[in-house]
Image (cartoon, grey):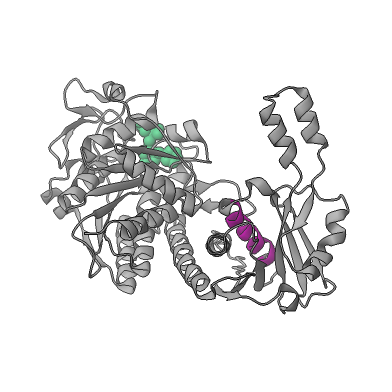
Amino acid sequence: MKTTISLTGPAQLETESLVAVVLDHSEKDHSEKDHSEKDHGHSSSDKNKDAKPHLRVESNDPAVQSAAAELLASGELSGKPFEINLLHKPAGLKAKRILLLSGGKTKKFAGYDLRRLAGAAVRSLKSRAIRSFAFIAPSTIPPEEAVRAIVEGALVGNFDADYYRSDRKDQKIDALTILTSGNTDKAALEKAAAEAQIIGESQNFTRDLVNEPSNRMTPTILAERAKKMSAEVGLKCEVYGADKIKELKMGAFWSVAQGSDEPPALIIMRYEPAGAPEKPVLGLVGKGITFDTGGISIKPADGMEKMKYDMAGGATMIGAMRAIALLKPKVKVIGIVCATENMPSGKAQKPGDVQIAMSGKSIEIINTDAEGRLVLADGLHYAKQLGCTHLVDAATLTGAVVVALGYTNAGLFTNDDAMYERFSKALNKAGEKMWRLPLDDEYKENIKSGIADIVNSGGRWAGAINAAMFLKEFAEDTPWIHLDIAGTAWTEDQKPWIAKGPTGIALRSLVEFVKSFAATEKA
Ligand code: BES
Ligand code: MN
Ligand code: ZN
């Protein structure tokens, strides 16, 4: 998708379709009043129900306003997010069509929502075989932020996962123009668009990897894809097999890999730009289980096919390294992916087995289906050995995080408040949602073993926390964030802004997080 910034007046632009955002300016007063009165009774909800939307199209161009005027005044629209209307041959505009896209209440409307609207515009227009359009950036959001949101959101919307359908249409938007107005610095906006393009394309690169089924995305193939990408963008990439994993004494990683006929892969990608300070060195560690049967503690058949996306954390790190290599922030980053299948076999580990991790800690295997934390234990320890001063891991780690947070927020765990503050800002910039869960010492009880240092499964309660407590044993004192993306890496329903399938969650925040070190920390 080619992206252009234009300062042309929307009315003057010849395009297949203009896209304008419609916002509801009504409720403002009502909701403020409701809050101040602390009135949660019937009267306030009735009032809200009666409140008519007060819709305005977000463009200063009088021709755009008048093209939308009749529809907005008709009373036909709710103004709710993702309401879509397409008008043909709009009077007074050179555009062939104008798509009016509701964004909900103006007060709540932020970059997060604009991203999704851009995705919805792409998905609506491409399904009509339209290949190019122009999006009017709403002036309620600062122009650079708006440009980033529109480009990233449009790229997310442009991805479809139905690769193996013989009737796949593969409809895509080829060209996007973003119309901005006012005293904007065009060069700065073009830079923002170019960076957003790198990030959005990297997110789709990750989604491509996650989308592949396990017979087409073995650890070996994942490693090959990482190598190919690294060569293209100028990253150093090493891939190690079983021998090296055993030589490094990665007993936890190997305990999972030993049960599979597919060889495992330890993937290491290094970004060491000239002029970067010695420290920090950021370590991005990903869970790369290309298929999780559960092992001997085998999973039920129902829904097991979804376990092809159990390498999403690893794919996220590979995509993030791609974006980082192209954006070139002055900070060292090492990406590590522990890739293997989790299979039952005559060689598979069994419940009760004791494994010695690379760090020397002994682990009693209670459940062979708690395999992600095992491969990450050695990945995190290895990252520290390679000199990483800060660690972030991403993993589809627990069903329990889905119970806790559903499909909306990823789970976030950390041993370092300062790192959390920094990551929160990155989340905000990237328009992604994650929620911090606790890691109090009391939870450590749950992973005590009668025979070894720790067990790999802490039972039913606080399952997502127990998994994170296990990882914390290997991060130790190094500032570390763990992202449990089990509920958010895949969407079962298609949404107006995104296709059913892999989401690429966490990549954008990781990239913003890495960039924040380059901007503020000097040697
Ligand atoms: N890969 C799964 C977690 C998962 C569940 C990812 C649902 C995506 C969707 C993980 O390896 C797993 O099996 N976790 C177990 C841990 C338990 C045995 C302690 C779980 O969550 O049930
Ligand atoms: Mn598992
Ligand atoms: Zn798993």
- Taking the spot 48% from the left edge, 49% from the top edge, the residue there is 428
Quadrant containing the N terminus is bottom right
Q: Quadrant of residue 322?
A: bottom left
Q: Nearer the viewer, residue 126 or 284?
A: 284
Magenta-span inclusion, residue 119? yes
Q: Nearer the viewer, residue 300 or 336?
A: 336
Coordinates of residue 17 in the picture (x, y in percent): 72, 71
**Is residue 429 visible in this depiction of the protein?**
yes
Q: Which residues are magenta?
A: 113-126
- Taking the spot 67% from the left edge, 30% from the top edge, the residue there is 35
Q: Nearer the viewer, residue 39 or 463?
A: 39
- Secondary structure mostly seen in the magenta stretch: helix
In the rendered structure, the answer to whether residue 400 lies left or right of residue 120 reads left
**Is residue 343 visible in this depiction of the protein?**
no
* Depicted 134 relative to depicted 50: above or below: below
Magenta-span inclusion, residue 114? yes
Q: Quadrant of residue 269?
A: bottom left
Coordinates of residue 239 in the picture (x, y in percent): 23, 61
Q: Quadrant of ligand 3?
A: top left
- Taking the spot 69% from the left edge, 65% from the top edge, the residue there is 125
